[in-house]
């Protein structure tokens, strides 16, 4: 017998799938160009919506930026639950924080479009 919890889980899954599909459609080349032009600057509404959605994706598998000091260099890691420290270090290193942000956006966008 189906319960209300089963129905709630079904609706949550439908909502998640529709949200991801909408996000894929909104994550256009124009949005990527707007972000790459000014990763720390003000963004238009569509770009801001995409950034907010990408930042709110589940933590597992997410790329992050960390620094060895107050002014870099900036490194990229991927959160992988179960790894030592829950981080998988990559070879990516940047002297400029904005370049690291561009790399992260590109990686998150590729991951979204791949799924």
Image: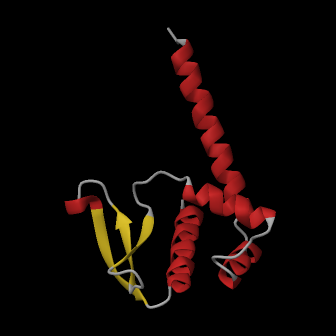
Q: Position of residue 103 (x, y in %)?
A: 52, 80
40 left or right, relative to 79: right
* For residue 107, above or below residue 37: above
Farthest residue toward the front? Answer: 70
Residue drawn at point x = 78 percent, y = 63 percent: 46
Q: Quadrant of the C terminus?
A: bottom right
Q: Nearer the viewer, residue 4 or 48?
A: 48
Q: Position of residue 65 (x, y in %)?
A: 43, 73
Q: Position of residue 50 (x, y in %)?
A: 68, 61
Q: Where is residue 70, by image quadrant?
A: bottom left
* Colour setup of the view: secondary structure
Q: Where is residue 80, by image quadrant?
A: bottom left
Q: Nearer the viewer, residue 59 or 26?
A: 59
Q: Nearer the viewer, residue 40 or 75?
A: 40
Q: Nearer the viewer, residue 87 or 28?
A: 87
Farthest residue toward the top? Answer: 1
Q: Position of residue 27 (x, y in %)?
A: 69, 66
7 left or right, relative to 42: left
Q: How many marks?
A: 0
């Amino acid at each position: 017998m189906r319960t209300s919890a089963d129905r709630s889980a079904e609706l949550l899954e439908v909502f998640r799938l529709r949200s991801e599909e909408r996000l894929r459609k909104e994550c256009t080349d124009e949005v990527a160009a707007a972000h790459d032009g000014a990763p720390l600057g003000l963004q238009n509404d569509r770009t801001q919506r995409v950034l907010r959605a990408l930042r709110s994706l589940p933590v597992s598998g997410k790329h992050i930026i960390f620094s060895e000091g107050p002014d870099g260099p900036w490194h990229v890691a991927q959160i992988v639950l179960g790894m030592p420290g829950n981080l998988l270090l990559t070879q990516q290193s940047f002297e400029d924080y904005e370049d690291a942000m561009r790399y992260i956006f590109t990686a998150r966008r590729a991951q979204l479009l791949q799924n």
